[in-house]
Image: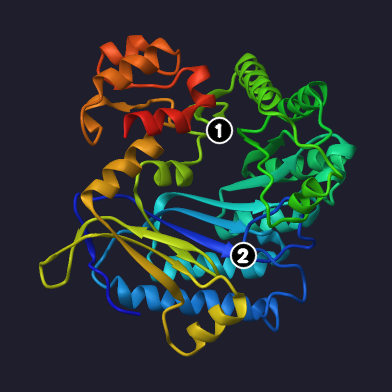
């Protein structure tokens, strides 16, 4: 792997994402780079860990001179906890050896409730994990069945209790707008999630992608998509219920129960911090920086080959697993900053727009998309209605 410029300017935080492509069953709505058993191309799960550690060794050489420790680590998938606690601990040890871990690092793994036990969660906490993000999706069996989720609703309470007993912070992921899901169904799932008292809740609208099994079912008329107006009602109901329960939104799809319980790793994405993505299909980003020879290097994004077999072969041969690289200009970065920062509750300064857009901003206020009081103070901040139309706001402002 070619050396990359090593000193961030100005200094940014650094995080690590590790993609684990294993899933017990590939859900019908899933469009992620995941594989059911036997389809991964790895001879064993230990082979996957070896390949990931091999990429970290390449990263150590490529980032020689960059002394920033990882402030966040996020292991996602797939279902990372299809790896046992020993394997996940080995991945975290690889991060320690490659970059080091900040003393207050946030270390998260995603998990399904039926892929963890009290013993495995305790082992992860002992290894240095601080947080688990559990895929709840819904509390209702018929919605879970449509999504092809394999866990039973009652398993969620057991998993949350076990994570709490291990001392881990708990986040729950929910999905709304599943075909056949009513507003009352969604409210029941919200109430069930709130009753578990997690530290953090994410709620995402289901997007049915054309290449998925669910996309094929939709095309054949076997299911009917929930209309956008109903999805908007579901979002507004989520925001109201969560606010009543003491959860504050900090990003369009994310709520935290207390200050400091936000997902710091995801905030790093939204605020354009640096990260290295390890694993098949993982994406990485390094902002503008100073190279070993003192020259300035442009921001760069790259992403690894998606197929696990090709990924493992490249790493074993000492080659970079990167499939493509994309240099980013200052104009690119300014555009992306609007796309990402506008999603945050704190919004963004008007002065950070690539170019002034007073008429467009005023029109967004008139349409109830931007908060007019915040605009007077020099900030762009979405209203509740604006959160439902964030993409339209970005288009108008860029």
- Quarter assignment of residue 246: top right
| Location of residue 214 with respect to 362 vertically, above or below | below
> Can residue 120 be seen from the camera position used here?
yes
Farthest residue, direction left: 294
Question: What element does badge 1 sit on?
Answer: strand
Q: Which residue is mark 1?
A: 254
Quadrant containing the C terminus in the rendered view: top left
Q: CA distance from mark 2 to mark 1?
A: 23 Å
Q: How many marks?
A: 2
> Can residue 28 be seen from the camera position used here?
no
- Nearer the observer, 87 or 201: 201
Marks 2 and 1 close (CB-CB < 8 Å):
no
Badge 2: few (under 14), some or many (20 or more) residues near its Cα, within 10 Å? many
Mark earlier in primary sequence (2, 1): 2
Residue 257 spot, x, y in % from top left: 57, 26
Q: Which residue is mark 2?
A: 20
Question: What element does badge 2 sit on?
Answer: strand
Residue drawn at the location 23% of the way across and 66% of the way down: 6
Badge 1: few (under 14), some or many (20 or more) residues near its Cα, within 10 Å? many
Residue 75 spot, x, y in % from top left: 57, 58
Q: Is residue 364 left or right of residue 121?
A: left
- Quarter assignment of residue 327: bottom left
| Location of residue 374 with respect to 119 vertically, above or below | above
């Amino acid at each position: 792997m070619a050396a990359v410029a090593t000193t961030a300017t100005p200094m940014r935080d650094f995080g690590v994402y590790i993609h684990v492509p294993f899933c017990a069953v590939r859900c019908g709505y899933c469009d992620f780079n995941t594989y059911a058993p036997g389809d991964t191309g790895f001879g064993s799960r230990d082979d996957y860990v070896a390949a990931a550690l091999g990429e970290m060794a390449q990263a150590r050489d490529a980032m020689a001179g960059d002394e920033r420790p990882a402030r966040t680590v996020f292991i996602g998938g797939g279902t990372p906890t299809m790896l046992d606690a020993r394997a996940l601990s080995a991945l975290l040890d690889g991060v320690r050896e490659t970059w080091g871990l900040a003393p207050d690092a946030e270390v998260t793994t995603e998990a399904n409730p039926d892929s963890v036990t009290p013993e495995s969660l305790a082992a992860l906490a002992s290894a240095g994990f601080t947080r688990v993000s559990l895929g709840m999706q819904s509390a209702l069996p018929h919605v879970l069945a449509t999504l092809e989720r394999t866990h039973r609703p009652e398993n969620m309470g057991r998993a949350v209790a076990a994570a709490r007993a291990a001392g881990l912070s708990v986040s729950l992921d929910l999905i709304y707008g599943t075909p056949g899901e009513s507003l009352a169904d969604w409210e029941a799932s919200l109430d069930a999630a709130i009753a578990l008292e997690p530290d953090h809740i994410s709620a995402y609208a289901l997007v049915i992608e054309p290449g998925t099994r669910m996309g094929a079912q939709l095309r054949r008329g076997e299911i009917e998509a929930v209309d956008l107006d109903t999805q908007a009602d579901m979002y507004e109901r989520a925001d109201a219920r969560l606010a009543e329960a003491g959860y504050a939104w900090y990003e369009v799809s994310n709520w935290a129960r207390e200050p400091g319980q936000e997902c710091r790793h995801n905030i790093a994405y939204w605020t354009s911090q640096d990260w290295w993505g390890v694993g098949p299909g993982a994406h990485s980003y390094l902002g503008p920086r100073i190279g070993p020879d003192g020259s300035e290097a442009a921001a760069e994004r790259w992403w690894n080959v998606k197929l696990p077999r090709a990924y493992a072969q490249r790493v074993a041969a000492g080659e970079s697993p990167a499939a493509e690289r994309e240099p980013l200009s200052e104009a690119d970065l300014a555009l992306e900053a609007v796309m990402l920062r506008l999603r945050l509750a704190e919004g963004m300064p008007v002065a950070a727009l690539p170019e002034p857009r007073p008429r467009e901003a005023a029109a967004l206020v008139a349409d109830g998309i931007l908060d007019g009081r915040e605009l007077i103070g020099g900030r762009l901040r979405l209203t509740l209605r604006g959160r439902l139309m964030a993409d339209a706001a970005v288009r108008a402002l860029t």
